[in-house]
Image (cartoon, coloured by chain):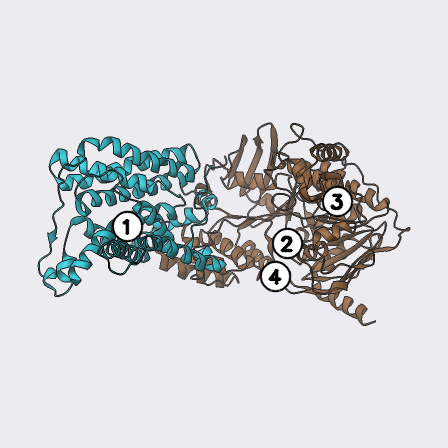
Chain colours: A brown, B cyan
């Protein structure tokens, strides 16, 4: 594989010393990258490793601070996405740059030669989408399409410009496994045509399956350049995560206490057309246990969190029990009063109000559960500023939240620091049960390790912790028990020591085996 | 009788249609210009003044377009270049426009105006019933009809119109595609201002050919409501404009009726009707997520600052 690349006179894309500074922060630091003709090249890294920044520079969305980019041996400057397209670089964004009010054909027309008539574009869209196995109706409004179909528009749009290099930014994070399969087939077809693909992902199993080479980024620097098929998931993960991160002291798997959370055969119909239905979810978490729920995004994680937290109470009251009490129909504040804590996935706008100060955000989450501490005057509910502020300061110092000023707006904190605060806000109450969704999404490695340690410590102190995460490294670091969610179904729980990365990958991908296994278990 | 009513309705509706069409283009690009009333009154005073000073009503039209256009340029600089809040800026410019036009037009108060003369189109104007009304109108009326179909074609058939709708839907993505968001929005704002100026010119050259302070009398606000009522579609602006215009005429007649001791329909009720109708349309649109997504410019009123 590597030797065949040497035959080419020069690689398709060659990047040397590419650097992007945001203020004094180096999102990308002296990146070197080579992509050969007809090669599927993986760009691996954790959230915030600089993957997106790098490809935005390659696509002309951002301008590099330093460094050079060469295409087929010729140095190029890419001032705009339009120029990138002219040079033969196409891109499919993670967050689609589509216009919901416009039709498929109109969306595609916007990025093509303005002289091509719309009717011809509609025709070509239909042809190309059929040829690559990505069926699309050119006259449909984007607002009416599913996420997978929207991604197809982006791919077809890139293909219509006949690109030499197609950049895909975490394409499978929004896809169902079936849609992902289809995408892989399309990628293989592109490779067979001699086009190159830069495939951004942090899913090791995918990368090992379809990619010829991999470049690993961490903290904006290249930490590995390898053939992913020659590596083990562990060695790839080490390149992604690094070694200097403080090791999390895991809870002891032996000594679990009483069952604190019990979910018995809960099914929830989807609330919106885009939601996943939960199908027969059952789980038990005991004191001292950290149950991690792994799975590809969009397989029912947020719906499960909503049901567990009571943001959307469920129909069967005894479907969920907290410390033995049925709570299925209770709302989140009532469940908090029973000693539960919840940390949702979205930091801004869900877990915290960006424009409000940290102390205000603390009060918003805990005004009911800590009424006595934070509010005075009974029905008057007068705010006890001193108590709220000192609790907020306590959380910041325990969780090492770095902030500007004493009580800054939540939005002024970096993602990692705000996440530390949000998790700390719940931990401060010493909840008997804590449910966390994506605790370290987009958080730097140091903050992530701090948060993980805090979760483990909470379990050690005798609480039950449920962590919903897509980050397998994280799951292996902290979980005592692991279950996998896939298409709204939860697998049987496995003790963490008995599962390998490969097995989890199988459970995440091979829905059918996992599902039939779970059903067989139910039958008995 | 029928002709007379139709004639007054056309005269009352034309400025609403023109101002709303301009605002429709502005809003389709994602900019909410609440200064419409101010642009209109600036157009009205500029048109009247130009006509007085040159003796030509046609130059007056040009003056009105320039007056509204230049005033909207101020709005553009404030909201697009300096990224000021669009709602606050629009409101401020409405107040500024009303005051400034009163100041500028002080010497014209009470002067007899120069009326824009109708252009009779041969043959077509001989059609019975409506021929004389529709085809012996002034230039501004013909322009309003041409604008409806021209803008309809521009927005939904031309590539530039597509880009403009794309910017209005999602300016971040449009920028990522290499579309010049700020320049396009400047052009849309200028066009909207020019249309508002033209609508103002109609008021001071056709509707009541004289200069009266505050002579727009809230028509800018009705035009703003009309854009929403028409769910950002030019042909619906035409239909809605005539509906609102007819309601306005009905309100006048209701007052006369009440004064002469006839049936008393509260005129306040009729003057509230366009806004009530707009709220009803808003409720219908908002009821369904899909119709909202497809009809409403999603980035309307949001400031755009490219990240680079």
Q: Are marks 4 and 3 on the same chain?
A: yes
- B275 to the left or right of A333: left
Q: Element at badge 2?
A: helix
The residue closer to the viewer here, A375 or B42, is A375
Q: Chain of mark 2?
A: A
Q: Which residue is mark 2?
A: A210
List x then y, in percent, for residue A86: 43, 44
Give coordinates of residue A267: x percent, y percent.
Answer: 70, 65
Of marks 4 and 3, the one in the foreground: 4
Are callouts 2 and 3 both on one chain? yes
* Distance between the alpha carbons at the discs numbered 2 and 4: 35 Å
Q: CA distance from mark 2 to mark 1?
A: 61 Å
Q: CA distance from mark 4 to mark 1?
A: 43 Å
Chain where mark 4 sits = A
Q: Nearer the viewer, mark 4 or mark 1?
A: 1
- Chain under numbered label 1: B
Q: CA distance from mark 4 to mark 3?
A: 41 Å
Considering only vertical position in the picture, is B82 above or below A280?
Answer: above
Residue to which mark 4 is pinned: A271
Residue A36 lies in what quarter of the image?
A: top right
What number is the disc on residue A222? none
Mark 1, residue position: B16
Q: Which residue reaches farthest front? A: B261
Q: Earlier in the sequence, mark 2 or mark 3?
A: 2
Instruction: Determine contact: label 2, label 4, CB under 8 Å.
Output: no
Q: CA distance from mark 2 to mark 3?
A: 18 Å
- Give the total of numbered labels: 4
């Amino acid at each position: 594989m590597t030797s065949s690349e040497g035959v080419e006179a020069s690689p398709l894309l060659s990047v040397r010393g590419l650097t992007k500074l945001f203020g004094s922060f180096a999102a990308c630091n002296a990146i070197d990258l080579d992509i050969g003709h007809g090669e599927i090249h993986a760009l691996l890294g954790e959230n915030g490793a600089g993957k997106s920044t790098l490809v935005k520079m390659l696509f002309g969305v951002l301008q590099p601070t330093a460094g050079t980019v060469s295409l087929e041996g010729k140095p190029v400057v890419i001032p705009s996405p339009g120029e990138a397209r002219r040079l033969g670089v196409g891109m499919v964004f993670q967050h689609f740059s589509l216009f919901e009010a416009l039709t498929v054909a109109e969306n595609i027309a916007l990025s093509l030669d303005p002289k091509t008539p719309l009717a011809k574009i509609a025709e070509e869209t239909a042809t190309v989408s059929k040829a690559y196995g990505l069926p699309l109706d050119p006259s449909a409004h984007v607002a009416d399409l599913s996420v997978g179909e929207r991604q197809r528009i982006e791919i077809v749009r890139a293909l219509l410009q006949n690109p030499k290099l197609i950049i895909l930014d975490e394409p499978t994070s929004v896809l169902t496994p079936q849609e992902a399969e289809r995408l892989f087939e399309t990628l293989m077809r592109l490779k067979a045509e001699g086009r190159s693909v830069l495939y951004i992902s942090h899913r090791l199993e995918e990368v090992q399956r379809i990619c010829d080479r991999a470049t690993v980024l961490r903290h904006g620097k290249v930490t590995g350049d390898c053939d992913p098929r020659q590596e083990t998931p562990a060695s790839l993960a080490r390149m992604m995560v690094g070694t200097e991160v403080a090791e999390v002291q895991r809870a002891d798997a032996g000594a679990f206490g009483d069952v604190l959370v019990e979910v018995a055969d809960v099914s929830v119909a989807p609330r919106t057309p885009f939601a996943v239905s939960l199908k027969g979810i059952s789980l038990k978490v005991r004191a001292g246990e950290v149950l991690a729920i792994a799975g590809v995004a969009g397989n029912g994680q947020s719906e499960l969190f909503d049901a567990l937290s009571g943001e959307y109470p469920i129909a069967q009251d005894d479907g969920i029990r907290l410390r033995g009490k049925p709570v299925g129909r209770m709302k989140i504040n009532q469940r908090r009063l029973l000693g539960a804590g919840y940390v949702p996935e979205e930091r801004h706008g869900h877990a915290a109000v960006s424009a409000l100060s940290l102390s205000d955000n603390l009060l918003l989450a805990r005004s009911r559960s800590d009424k006595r501490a934070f509010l005075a005057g009974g029905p008057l509910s007068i705010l006890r500023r001193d108590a709220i502020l000192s609790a907020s300061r306590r959380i910041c110092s325990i969780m090492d939240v770095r902030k500007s000023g004493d009580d800054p707006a939540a939005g002024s904190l970096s993602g990692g620091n705000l996440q530390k605060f949000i998790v700390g806000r719940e931990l401060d109450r010493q909840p008997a049960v804590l449910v966390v969704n994506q605790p370290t999404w987009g958080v730097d490695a140091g903050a992530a390790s701090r948060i993980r340690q805090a979760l483990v410590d909470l379990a050690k102190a005798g609480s039950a912790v449920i962590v919903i995460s897509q980050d397998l490294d994280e799951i292996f670091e902290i979980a005592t028990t692991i279950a996998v969610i896939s298409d709204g179904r939860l697998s049987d729980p496995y003790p963490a020591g008995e599962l390998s990365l490969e097995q989890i990958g199988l459970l995440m991908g091979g829905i059918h085996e996992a599902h039939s296994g779970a059903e067989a278990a139910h039958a008995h | 009788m029928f002709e007379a009513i139709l004639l007054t309705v056309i005269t009352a509706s034309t400025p609403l249609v023109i101002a709303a069409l301009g605002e429709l283009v502005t809003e389709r690009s994602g900019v909410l210009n609440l200064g419409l009333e101010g642009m209109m009154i600036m157009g009205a005073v500029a048109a009247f003044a130009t006509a007085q000073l040159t003796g030509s009503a046609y130059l007056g039209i040009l003056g009105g377009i320039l007056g509204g256009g230049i005033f909207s340029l101020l709005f553009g600089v404030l909201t697009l270049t300096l990224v000021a809040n669009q709602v606050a800026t629009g409101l401020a410019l409405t107040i500024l426009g009303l005051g400034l036009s009163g100041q500028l037009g002080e010497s014209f108060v009470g002067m007899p105006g120069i009326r824009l003369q109708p252009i009779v189109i041969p043959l077509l104007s001989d059609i019975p019933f409506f021929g004389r009304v529709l085809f012996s109108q002034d230039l501004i009326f013909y322009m309003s009809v041409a604008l409806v179909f021209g803008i309809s074609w521009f927005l939904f058939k031309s590539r530039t119109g597509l880009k403009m709708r794309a910017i209005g839907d999602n300016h971040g993505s449009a920028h990522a595609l290499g579309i010049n968001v700020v320049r396009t929005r400047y052009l849309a704002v200028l066009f909207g201002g020019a249309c508002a100026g033209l609508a103002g010119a109609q008021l001071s050259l056709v509707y009541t050919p004289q200069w009266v302070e505050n002579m727009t009398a809230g028509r800018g606000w009705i035009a703003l409501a009309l854009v929403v009522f028409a769910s950002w579609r030019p042909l619906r602006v035409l239909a809605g404009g005539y509906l609102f215009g007819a309601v306005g005429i009905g309100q006048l007649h209701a007052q006369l009726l009440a004064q002469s001791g006839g049936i008393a329909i509260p005129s306040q009720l009729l003057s509230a009707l366009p806004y009530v109708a707009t709220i009803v349309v808003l409720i219908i649109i908002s009821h369904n997520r899909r119709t909202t997504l497809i009809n409403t410019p999603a980035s309307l009123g949001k400031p755009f600052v490219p990240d680079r």
